[in-house]
Image (tube, helix red, strand yellow):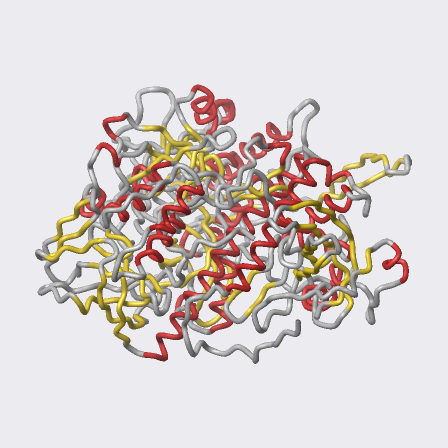
Amino acid sequence: MLKSKTFVKKTRSGGIMKIVREHYLRDDIWCGSEVCTECKQEETVLQKDACIESNLCSFPHYLLPDTNIVLSQIDILEDPLIKNVIILQTVLQEVRHRSAPIYKRLKDILHDKEKHFYTFTNEHHRETYIEREQGESANDRNDRAIRISTKWYSDHLNNTPTDKRLKVVLLTNDRGNKEKAEESGLLTYRCKKQDTSVTSVPQDETAVLTSNEITSSKVLFPEHLPLSRIQSGIKSGTFQQGTFRASRDNYLEATVFVHGEGDDSTEVLIQGLQNLNRAVHQDLVAVEILPLNQWVAPSSVVLQDEGPKEDDVTEEEEAELKSGPSGAASRKPTGRVVGIIKRNWRPFCGMLFLSQIKEATRHLFTPADRRIPRIRIETRQAATLAGQRIMVAIDGWPKHSRYPNGHFVRSLGSAGDKETETEVLLLEHDVPHQDFSQAVLSFLPKMPWNITEEDMAVREDLRNLTVCSVDPPGCTDIDDALHCRDLPNGNQEVGVHIADVSHFIRPGNAMDLEAANRGTTVYLTGRRIDMVPELLSSNLCSLRSSVERLAFSCIWEINDKAEIVKTRFTKSVINSKVRFHIDSETHDPIDLQTKELKETNSMVEEFMLLANISVAQKIYDEFSECALLRKHPAPPPSNYDILNKAAKSKDMVIHTDSAKALADSLDAAQVDGFPYFNTLLRILATRCMMQAVYFCSGMDSDFHHYGLASPIYTHFTSPIRRYSDIIVHRLLAVAIGADSTYPDLMDKHKQSALCNNLNYRHKMAQYAQRASVAYHTQLFFKSRGILNEEGFILFVRKNAIIVLIPKFGLEGTVFFENKDKPSPKLIFNEEVPSLTVEGHSFNMFDKVKVTISLDASNVQHQKIRMSLVEPVISGVSVAPSEPEPEVKRAKLDR
């Protein structure tokens, strides 16, 4: 049977197009049931003995859910007890259009033969297809199609002589749909998630099929509030909206960064699985602030999820949290997650840990990022995936499950392989690292490239100046150079010359869009992920020795008191005079060293900072609403608590009223016989700082850069590796009449959105770099075996000390506990802070001796193990440590 629809459509050119769509209907589509004798089907899906343990349905039955049931109750449909379900083609198509993740989960259920879910193509069956009536909405038409198909199934199965008791149950929460179904004589139930099980049929007219009737799982988490309740609660001030940030050190603790206006933001502490309530790192959540008497202090316990657990919250886990400091001064605003506003789920990298049950298909996936919970997935290729780094996506997190459910995405390669591990850290930190597309490469200049007479006509010729760059060996992306010369009037001229990248990357083309998305070059150990193609980064834009290059110059006239007499900016042509040397091919690390700053580095830094400040003032003077600037907020006084306690332990006072007061205090902080004390104190001071960020001048009023004690600042000096600098170059070029403007450059809202992406990319690049150092640190210790080294206690925790090894710039945690042996007696003093272990007191900056080795027992999370050698404490055993493989020195924001 053939149905056809004819309609007309207006084309872009104004013409009329007649469209005819043919729709074929058949009468040989099977019902899929074992009890059926009418359908000539070779294979059946729906079972003859179809019973689900439910108080409402003691007779054999098939379930037929409508679209909204599938969308809202997919967790119930995934339950192993739910079998023999009819999914109509109408429902499947609606789900596909409305939710891709739920559609994927539904398809997975349909492919699971043990679930006995059957897809009935009602839209092509002659007796179940219906036309949309005049004035009928698409939703009402689909509801009617579902009722028609349900009735057809009921009549069809009743025609079989084998079993008259078999029923078809329509599941719908739509009152109108339910009433119309019952008028047609259909058996209809609602399906709601409820916390209490129903032991008998409800007294009202509506039967309720509850989740506890079809699954014995205990409810572990509170129900998430609907979005309407959340929005009204935020509006009334009952709830707060913020970003959920899970802790790396304690999986039962997190903070929610509540966004305020400007810099007026607060952090809310969340403790305990039920209060965390299935939020995942970086989700946008709604939190309820608890009463003041329920506020707590952050836990001092380092606590990690050690392995697969039953779907329950143990008393031991919750007790761990209560062992934190209890002083009123240490308490912070504390709350609980009441709902999820927006999930920020992405595919996560990690490893699959196989179930101990033979032939099991459900296994736990452990993400590489400790802030992400384990994910339960179902796969029949677990044996193949064992030992592989894989990617898994989260589908949902039922309230009766300790872990979220997810599905396998793809394999990345063998765990431990250098290429695989590098791919993992790039993916985990969202670093764009694909090869540049042909569309991007098409905007590169044709080679051989030379500076033209047209270029020289609009630029200042500075090729006669002795211009030099100061860069480490192996550096190929040289974007800055300096010159200094005496002037006839006795003053000096100093110039900073920056690669003119904006000459090659024009606004809005494919190369510009790609650079804007990448935001920054990412430097890993032995590998560089360029922001722009190599032809620019290492060749045409690199200020190489004895080669003519285009530059953007900032030139000052300075008197004998180092006062700036005059500042000017110009597009230029230079010819650098410092040769540089390229390192040989990078292999596994043969030595591990901390970075050493030379006096020449400091000289370069000072002039680069001056250039950035000068350019910032110029572009703000010209474009007060759309200048791209960089600020560094002053830390709140509470950030300095740990620094003040450390100084007090040595009878010193650190003044933190201003950046200059802090710098002067640090300069004066010296202890006789303890030369490394000042370095330790500076490391702590760096940890107290806030993150510097880019912003648009028209969207903020606080421009101050705390770390540099400058009222205004930007980034101008590294356009090869930072997209922010390219925008600043364009603004400066327009300001001096060297280039034309374009709409996006003058749009403060678009500039602000760009700044948000740049801040995110810079932060993730830093994390990726640290992860790369951590991985290569592990490779180093893997080849070196066990080493004994001296270190200093940097932090004291309730059950551990964090030790810094100056020789390697390596941090690690020494735990004073072991699950296989009785724990030693521990006394933690938060005020000092100090930790007494079996009578021996450990204080910040104490010297200790530790054994360092690589613990490779867990392929997923290989660790640097630190164990205490000196002082010797009887009965103390230690657990593996988590390294922080880098001394975080305070450095200038160049």
Image location (x, y in percent) of residue 875: 9, 64
Judge whether 63 appears above or below 368 on screen: above
From the viewer's side, name the closer residue of 252 and 663: 663
Judge whether 783 appears above or below 596 on screen: below
Image location (x, y in percent) of residue 874: 9, 65
User: So how many labels did they put on this image?
Assistant: 0
Quadrant housing residue 551: bottom right
Image location (x, y in percent) of residue 327: 20, 35
Image location (x, y in percent) of residue 822: 10, 59
Judge whether 763 appears above or below 786 on screen: above
From the viewer's side, name the closer residue of 797 and 701: 701
Residue drawn at x 74%, y 54% as measured from the top left: 552
Q: Residue 162: tell me if it is visible.
A: no
| Left or right: 128 as drawn, with respect to 54 | right
Q: Residue 681: tell me if it is visible.
A: yes
Quadrant housing residue 608: bottom right
Residue drawn at x 41%, y 72% as measured from the top left: 592
Name the quadrant of the N terminus: top right
From the viewer's side, name the closer residue of 655 and 643: 655
